Amino acid sequence: MNQKVMSIFTRTPMHVGAGSSVGAVDQPIIRERHTGFPVIPGSSLKGVLTTLWADETNLNKNKKRIQESDLELLFGSDDNDHAKAGKLLIGEGKILAFPVRSAKNAFAWCTCPLVLARAKRDLGLSVPAFAINGADECLAPASMTMKGKVVLEEYCLNHSGDVHEGLTNALQGISDDAAWLDELQSHLVILSDEMFSYFVENACEIAQHVRIDADTGTAIPGALFNQVNVPSETMFYTVLHEAEEGLAEKVSVKLAEQDHVLQIGGDAGAGLGWCTVKLLNKLA
């Protein structure tokens, strides 16, 4: 089975919700249970890609997928009389780099050994040998340092070396977004797994919302709620498995028609979830 990779780079904050919460946050995002890393479910990505074909040439009058159309071939049929699985399998979106506020260069794109090990397995990413010997150490460009320290949020980390140029060059190729291409060399920081896990759980933005009464135009009493959003400039990736060669190319054509921009998650009307996407072969 052939594999392709789709990178997902958030242009705006993104909310892929996990439903209501009984905790301090009313609307959390979906996270891995064992790491706390944000993820985008494969079902969400499948739904977004499906909408690229949602026109009358692929749907009948009952809004069922027409047999033998590209829509049915890729994503299967929801017709009870002709139910079938799609031939394009879409994995969950995994995090690759997470932006964190920095005292130098404004922010850092943070990653960690666990994330890079996954990228090596999933993408074929070539990862040069490196070592992070403690939670208070990191690898970073010299431009990120202040007297041998890297300051992220309220944490002051020891600078134990530079990020290997080969790794940065390999990561640059997964997206064509101008911000990623222009800034990655000077902003990539490798943290320990512990510090990365802390930041992805505690450095997401919390947005306050309130429901407005349509009749009065004022806030509804008791209707204030808060929502977690993954920040803009977060990099995810997903692996696509195609049962037949050339299926992913059909997706690539549709993405090009959208200028490689997709809206993922909720609150599209509020400007959330706009992402730059790129379909590419595995890196090795």
Image: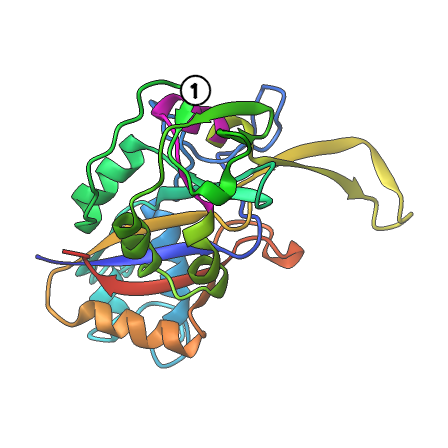
- Quadrant placement of the N terminus: bottom left
Q: Does the magenta stretch mainly form a helix, a strand or a loop?
A: helix
Q: Position of residue 254 (x, y in %)?
A: 35, 74
Q: Is residue 182 above or below residue 209?
A: below
The residue that appears at 53% across and 30% down in the rendered structure is 147
The outermost residue toward the right is: 216
Left-right relation of 187 to 27: left
Q: Name the one closer to the observer, 112 or 11.
A: 112
| Quarter of the rendering containing residue 24 | top right
> Where does the image place residue 183, in percent across and percent down from the top left?
48, 56
Residue reaching furthest bottom? 57
Horizontal side of 227 relative to 34 (left or right) equals: right
Could you say which is closer to the camera, residue 244 or residue 138?
Answer: 138
| Residue that carries the numbered disc 1 in the rendered image | 136
Furthest residue to the front?
147
User: Looking at the image, which residue is at 43% across and 36% down?
Assistant: 38
- Give the extent of the magenta segment: 187-199
- In percent of width and height, residue 129 lies at 19, 36
- Identified at 11% across, 69% down, the residue is 245
Q: Quadrant of residue 113?
A: top left
Q: Amino acid at mark 1?
A: Asp
Q: Nearer the viewer, residue 126 or 281?
A: 126
On whether residue 217 falls in the magenta region, the answer is: no
* Label 1: which secondary element: loop
Q: Is residue 106 visible?
A: yes
193 part of magenta stretch: yes
Residue 114 vs 10, above or below: the answer is above
The x, y position of residue 249, in whole percent, is 23, 73
Q: From the viewer's perspective, is 171 left or right of 19?
A: left
Neighbour class for label 1 at 10 Å: few (<14), some, many (≥20)?
some
